[in-house]
Amino acid sequence: GVFNSPKLLTLSGVAEPEELHRLGIPLIASSPEVGRNLHEHVGFSIIVGTSVPCPEGYHVIDGGTTHLGNLDEFIAQFYVFFNSTEDVPNALGPLDAELMLLEGCVEGYLSLTFTVMLLRSNTRGRLIVQSRNPFTSPHLDY
């Protein structure tokens, strides 16, 4: 994922040469962008319960239900992307926000999760591998 992929690449010798030298890891391939240019995707979610019972067997994890469940169990999903910064009708431009509507189960009843997420942020971060020990957490520098 976002954190373990650059960590795994660095520990495998694929990263910025100076970073590998600092950690004492032999260079396999120079790839200065590994672990760099991380973007935040700030968002919030609201979960709304319904009175509709969940279909039997859907969204069951370890004997209980979850508000999202497994990806192959979704009955419905809805995604919308917005371009709000250009403010030019019918013009193509960068996507600024995403609206998601996902169904799930809470206490045996269908639930709706509404999520709004900003897709373009001005923050940029970097993942720094702290140690050659694969169990040591990396550091995020924003």
Image (cartoon, grey):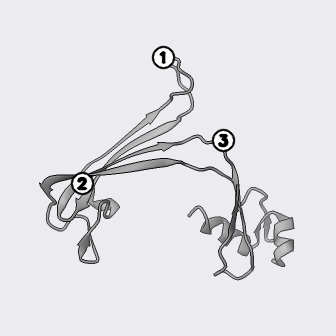
Picture layout, residue 76 above or below residue 3 = above
- What amino acid is at disc 2? Ser
Residue positioned 50% across, 29% down in the render: 83
* Residue 21 percent coordinates (x, y): 86, 73
Residue identified by numbered label 3: 122
Q: Would residue 25 appear left or right of 134 to someone viewing this image?
A: right
Residue identified by numbered label 2: 111
Alpha carbon separation for disc pair 2 and 1: 34 Å
Q: What secondary structure is found at the residue carrying circle 3?
A: loop
Q: What secondary structure is found at the residue carrying circle 2?
A: strand
* Residue 63 percent coordinates (x, y): 24, 77
Rate crowding at label 3 as few (under 14), some (14 to 19) or many (20 or more) other CA atoms within 10 Å. Answer: few
State yes or no: discs 2 and 3 in contact (Cβ < 8 Å).
no
Q: Quadrant of residue 11?
A: bottom right
Residue identified by numbered label 1: 89
Q: Would residue 72 appear left or right of 82 to someone viewing this image?
A: left
Residue positioned 31% across, 63% down in the render: 69
Q: What secondary structure is found at the residue carrying circle 1?
A: loop
Q: Which mark is first along the chain, 1 or 2?
A: 1
Alpha carbon separation for disc pair 1 and 3: 24 Å
